[in-house]
Image (cartoon, rainbow, N blue to C red):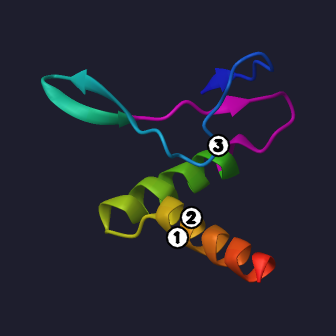
Amino acid sequence: LEEWDQNKDYDRLGFDEKHIKILGKNVRKMDVPVRTGRNIAMIVEVAAMSIRQKILGYNIEDEYNKRFENFNKKKKS
């Protein structure tokens, strides 16, 4: 968790995976910007669900891209 910085460019969809080494193992790192008054428990829960889905083989980013491309194809025709 880090304090929200409006000058920083955040990856909101998780396309760019970051890793750090902890005890010789690569561990997924996720920067989660927060602001006062936000539901931090919900934000962390959604981030954890996203990581769990990736581990289980479901990549929401790929699904989003496919749906977006299909939407654009339909819009153009």
Question: Dot 1: within a 10 Å radius of its alpha carbon, few (fewer than 14), some, or many (20 or more) residues?
Answer: few
Q: Which residue is mark 1?
A: 63
Q: Locate residue 44, reporting x and y percent.
A: 59, 45
Q: Mark 1 and mark 3 in contact (Cβ < 8 Å)? A: no
Q: Mark 2 and mark 1 in contact (Cβ < 8 Å)? A: yes
Q: Locate residue 70, reporting x and y percent.
A: 64, 78
Mark-to-mark CA distance, 3 and 1: 15 Å
Closer to the camera in the image, 35 or 12: 12
Q: Which residues are magenta?
A: 29-41
The secondary structure type at the circle numbered 2 is: helix
For the stretch drawn in magenta, the main secondary structure is loop
Tell me the kind of residue under disc 3: Arg
Q: Which residue is mark 3?
A: 12
Q: Is residue 24 positioned above or below 39 on the image?
A: above
Q: Is residue 34 within the magenta segment? A: yes
Q: Locate residue 37, reporting x and y percent.
A: 87, 35
Q: Is residue 75 positioned above or below 54 on the image?
A: below
Q: Is residue 70 within the magenta segment? A: no
Tell me the kind of residue under disc 1: Glu
Question: Dot 2: within a 10 Å radius of its alpha carbon, few (fewer than 14), some, or many (20 or more) residues?
Answer: few
In the image, which is nearer the foreground, mark 3 or mark 2? 2
In the image, which is nearer the foreground, mark 1 or mark 2? 2
Q: Quadrant of residue 18?
A: top left
State which quarter of the image contains the C terminus. bottom right
Instruction: Classify residue 61 as left or right of residue 27.
Output: right
Tell me the kind of residue under disc 2: Asn
**Which residue corresponds to the image point at 72% horizontal and 71% vertical from the top-left?**
72
Q: Locate residue 13, reporting x and y percent.
A: 60, 49
Q: Which residue is mark 2?
A: 65
Q: Is residue 12 positioned above or below 71 on the image?
A: above
**Which residue corresponds to the image point at 46% horizontal and 39% vertical from the top-left?**
16
The secondary structure type at the circle numbered 1 is: helix
